[in-house]
Amino acid sequence: MAITKKEIEHVARLARLDSSGGIFDSLSSDMQSIVAMVDKLQELDLSAISDTVDLTRVNALREDEVQESSPREKILKNAPSKESGGISVPKIVE
């Protein structure tokens, strides 16, 4: 499939892009390369790959379990600044 400079200019006009830069000559060859790569992908044999979704799987994640968290003292030991039993961070919003 050939992509012409005229087609690229048309798409640029639709997208309201500036067409005064003269970039469309090289862009045409770049687009040709991209289309050639996509065409090459079309040659792949994907018959062994399923294209359906397994709707029987409701939740593939583990069950939620209540667990003990790390002790507050252990967490605060590594904090650079502490205040009122928590980690103090610099104010970033006025």
Image: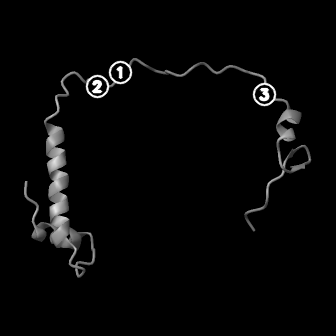
**Which residue is farthest right?**
84
Q: Amino acid at mark 2?
A: Thr
> Would you say the residues marked 1 and 2 are in contact, meaning their CB atoms lie under 8 Å apart?
yes
Which is closer to the viewer, label 3 or label 2? Answer: 3
| Snapshot quadrant of residue 86 | top right
The residue at which mark 3 appears reads as: 69
In the rendered structure, the answer to whether residue 89 lies left or right of residue 56 reads right
Q: Amino acid at mark 1?
A: Asp
The residue at which mark 1 appears reads as: 54
Whether 51 is drawn above or below 8: the answer is above
Mark 2: give few (<14), some (14-19) or many (20+) Cα within 10 Å. few
Pick whichever, 59 or 20, lies toward us.
20
* Residue at horizontal 78 percent and vertical 27 percent from the top: 69
The residue at which mark 2 appears reads as: 52
Q: Amino acid at mark 3?
A: Ser
Please report whichever mark, 1 or 3, sits nearer to the chain's N-terminal start: 1
Dot 1 lies on which element? loop
* Residue 68: mark: none
Q: Spatial distance from mark 3 to mark 2, Cα to Cα?
A: 40 Å
| Snapshot quadrant of residue 30 | bottom left
Dot 2 lies on which element? loop
